[in-house]
Amino acid sequence: MSRVPSLRAIAVWLFFAAASGASPQDMPKPGTPGAFTVGRETFDYGIEWRLIPAGTAKLTWSALPASGSGPASEIRLHLESAGLVSRLFRVSDDYTAMLGQSLCAQNTFLAAHEGNRSKETRVVFDNQNRRASYSEKDLTKNETVNKEVEIPACVHDVLGALMVLRNLRLEPGKTAQIPVSDGKKFVQAKVESQRREELKTALGDFKTIRYEVFLFDNVLFKRTGHLHVWLTDDDWRLPVQIQVRLQITIGTITFQLEKQEK
């Protein structure tokens, strides 16, 4: 039987690969076409691996009251395994990111419970001193790994950058270079707008634009793979599907939107 990947690994591959942002000057101002201004959005995804249900993901973005240099918005992601994947390797993970102006990352926290393992990972983005501090604590082994990396004045984390991509209007054939960091490594990743597609989902048919984000092949990840993101071709720019294709031993993993609330 082919190796079943960890659900958190699936989510990291997908959402990191969706972590593509634009520089602040490229982002539309609130209230202009292409800029989403909802105070809270929730996205529920079904996760499919090798054409079988693998789990669910709930992604919530919330605007916060203005507080000077404090966070301007918060993103939460909850992952839960299901079916075959859950029987082989149960996963329940929670990720939180606090974002400043222009969706620049301030700090992130991941509580991962996978099988008999538990880990907590914190990343602090010091934008003033242009450094990110990464700390991962293995609660089972009582071991801690710390790292630091240089970053630009504004860098995007895993999920905040997905929100930035929604504000970045790239017509098919256009590309952009965008700053991405996971706290361990910083890269200028290429995102390419490829073509318009009509996508059929459980919510109905959507007119979308398909993007490819180049984070595999020794960019942010050593692994060979392709990552595609489908955003609706309208002012809401809903992320209706995210898909990664890896080598044949893992195959294709898809996040598809099943419910969305504003």
Image (cartoon, rainbow, N blue to C red):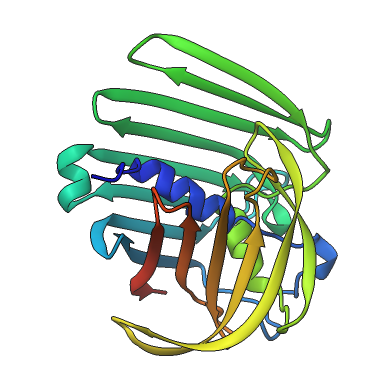
Please give left or right for residue 225 compared with residue 152 in the image: left
Residue 18 vs 153, above or below: the answer is below
Image quadrant assignment for residue 28: bottom right
Residue 176 vs 127, above or below: the answer is below
Q: Position of residue 150 (x, y in %)?
A: 80, 32
Is residue 247 something that shows in the picture? yes
Q: Residue at x 76, y 57 (%)?
A: 178
Q: Residue at x 66, y 45 (%)?
A: 105
Image quadrant assignment for residue 102: bottom right
Q: Position of residue 23 (x, y in %)?
A: 80, 60
Is residue 65 something that shows in the picture? no
Q: Position of residue 189 (x, y in %)?
A: 74, 54
Residue 13 vs 136, above or below: the answer is below
Which of the two residues, 240 or 13, is positioned nearer the viewer here? 13
Please give left or right for residue 243 compared with residue 221 in the image: left
Residue at the extreme top of the image, as rendered? 142
Image quadrant assignment for residue 4: top left
Which of the two residues, 186 or 89, is positioned nearer the viewer here? 89
